[in-house]
Image: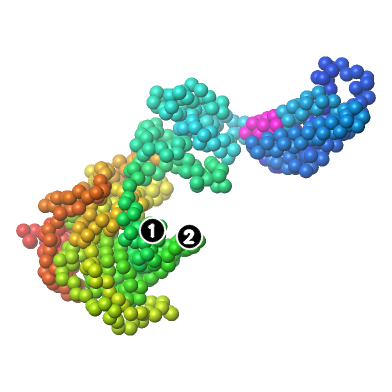
Amino acid sequence: MPIMLLSEKNTPRWIIFLIDVFICISSLVLAYLLRFNFHIPLVEIDRFNYVFPVVLGVRIISFLISKIYAGIIRYTSTRDAVRIFFTVTGGSVAFIIANLISYKIKAFYVVPFSIVIIDYITTVFVMTASRIFVKTLYMEITNPTKNKRDVIIYGAGESGVITKRALDRDAGTKYRVIAFIDDDEKKTGKTLEGIKIYSARKDFEDLLRANPVAHVIISIHNISLLKKRDIIEKCLKFNTKVLNVPPVDHWINGELSFKQIKKVKIEDLLERDPIELDLDKIEKYISGKRILITGGAGSIGSEIARQVVSFHPEKLIILDQAESSLYDFQLELTEKFHQSRTCGIETIIGDIRNKESMKVLFETFKPQVVFHAAAYKHVPVMEHNPSEAIMTNVFGTKVLADLSIEHQIEKFVMVSTDKAVNPTNVMGATKRIAEIYCQSLNKKPHKKLAAGSQQPATNNLHSGLQTADYKLQTEQPTQFITTRFGNVLGSNGSVIPRFRKQIEDGGPVTVTHPDITRYFMTIHEACQLVLEAGAIGNGGEIYLFDMGSHVKVTDLATKMVQLSGLQVGKDIQIIYTGLRPGEKLYEELLNNAENTIPTHHPKIVIGKVREYDFATISADVEELMALRCRKDDNTLVKKMKEMVPEFISHNSTYSKLDTINQ
């Protein structure tokens, strides 16, 4: 091959074409030499004069039709080899057919069969081998083996083979697969695509220790979370990056690309086994119903919406006051569900604190189930803005809860937080007051309008939508259900996106305290449990979710740095900034005076909590709203501490109020 084939510029097609023609001529000559043991009789030399143009003509025509000369030689792939095979085979089949016809007419072979066979084998081999040789030589020149980074593929099955081929095809100049690892001991010692298979149990750590392995690619589908965590933990010990092959249904046109192989995320270490849900029960209370989700453009609300759609509600009403987030989510739902959607989706801009606006919404869309996820949630911000926290988290919840009673909503599912347990901050206290108010509504006698009565006409939220007779359901009162869980992985403002951004920026990673711990669960898992709790709830319960083991935030930050291929103290620093106002060292899911009742679901329990009289808590909330008008934060927080006696401020300016109360 000419040297120009190894240059960065693409070699002209006509040069590749001439080289292929030269290979065909050489193969034909070699076929004659081999056939006659390098002593060609004169009679065969005479026959060669017409065999040569026939063979060359057929090869040239087949090359022009298939355009095998159009490929870039240095990027030759399996597909190119297959095209060469079929092109050469087609020409040789033409010789065979010509021989059969010629023999039948004149008892004469155009091209001797032995020459056809030898020429066919030689042409296929040389054309394919020459391209592979150029590709290999180009890769070695542009990126010598000593500069390539070692890679281990975990999984010596079909997926592992596909992963290696994708690596060779898309990133072969950068990486070199040095080993396959597999849990099946029967495969140990064998080779796959020329690469030796090693035992996961015996050899994995030794390979990591003995070689500067850049990446371990996990290429096993349906791998258990426990096994995946074990692989990742072993790799982190040796500062080896871990990559993960996506599921087959995520491959582009059924083919894996190296660019689709992604880094393992910290979520993979914290994720737990999939939750088994009572899908029939969930579908029964959602299917064909009108569902309202407040805070529907937020992390939790949007995921609840995604899951609710799969249960075929009649209408999904998504309420949020964040215009841009709501618009983006509307586009997502339109793109994802526009073909298969079986329900109407309405996106509404609105503020849950605006009673008149919420009243219009309820009367217009007549929701039957409400998932209340709208809230202010950032502890330090709310510590400095107690008035706004009360207005949204308490009064906003009260507005929705009261309207749910008035309009005979079947179920009202409130999304709460573990920070409502023994609250140490304003945010947690407001969520606890909201919990108490919703619980107390279950004990309040509910007034019901006569069936078929008409509500007063109101302005519509959307033009052309008429308010019809409003027939109230009188079978049972509204069921108020509360769900509590801890930190949700990847939610807006959570610690993981913040750490990820700090690592991308080169650090430092900031942690408030070396001993601080948190419970974590994925957004998907949290919202599944919200739906399940809504399905099994009868009203008045506070459902608590199994959050697993608490995680030390420092360990979380360290592993995130390591998963990025960096080292703590060398590439990225972790610094401690001190606890923020109202922040706890350890989160709780239950009040000390509470206990729990198991449910049919192993990950959900019911918290037995103190019951509150509706008249008392309602009067307290009204007083709290009146105090808000004074714009005196200390007075507001003092009243909250009276309503929630276990509210003891931590690291906050309001700690002095606890001293006064004592």
Picture quadrant where residue 447 is located: bottom left
- Residue type, numbered disc 1: Phe
> Which coloring applies here?
rainbow
Residue 319 is situated, as x and y percent measured from the top left of the image, at 36, 68
Q: Residue at x 54, y 31 (%)?
A: 176
Classify 10 Å Cα crowding around label 2: few (below 14), some (14-19), many (20 and above): few
**Residue 328 drawn above or below residue 468:** above
At x 43% / y 62%, what residue is drawn?
Answer: 329
Q: Residue 375 location in percent, x, y?
A: 28, 63
The residue beneath circle 1 is: 311
- 331 and 111: which is toward the camera: 111
* Count of number-bearing discs: 2
Q: Which residues are magenta?
A: 128-139
Secondary structure, magenta segment, majority class: helix
Q: Secondary structure at mark 1?
A: loop
User: Of residues 361 and 208, which is closer to you in this image?
Assistant: 361
Image vertical order of residue 34 relative to residue 339, above or below: above
382 on left or right of 2: left
Other residues around mark 1 within 10 Å, as few (<14) / some (14–19) / many (≥20): many
Say whether residue 543 is left or right of residue 1: left
The magenta stretch spans residue 133: yes
Instruction: Examine the rendered structure and indicate whether residue 638 appears above or below residue 422.
Output: below
Q: Residue 340 got which mark?
A: 2
In primary-sequence order, the first of circles 2 and 1 is 1
Give the residue at x 70% y 38%.
Answer: 83
Which amino acid is tagged 2?
A: Ser
Q: Is residue 629 magenta?
A: no
How far across and how far down the image is residue 274, in percent? Answer: 35, 45
Front residue (pair 501, 306)? 306
User: Which of the numbered marks, if any, corresponds to residue 43?
Assistant: none
Residue 564 appears in the picture as rendered: no
Q: Which residue is at the front of the view, 188 or 553?
A: 188
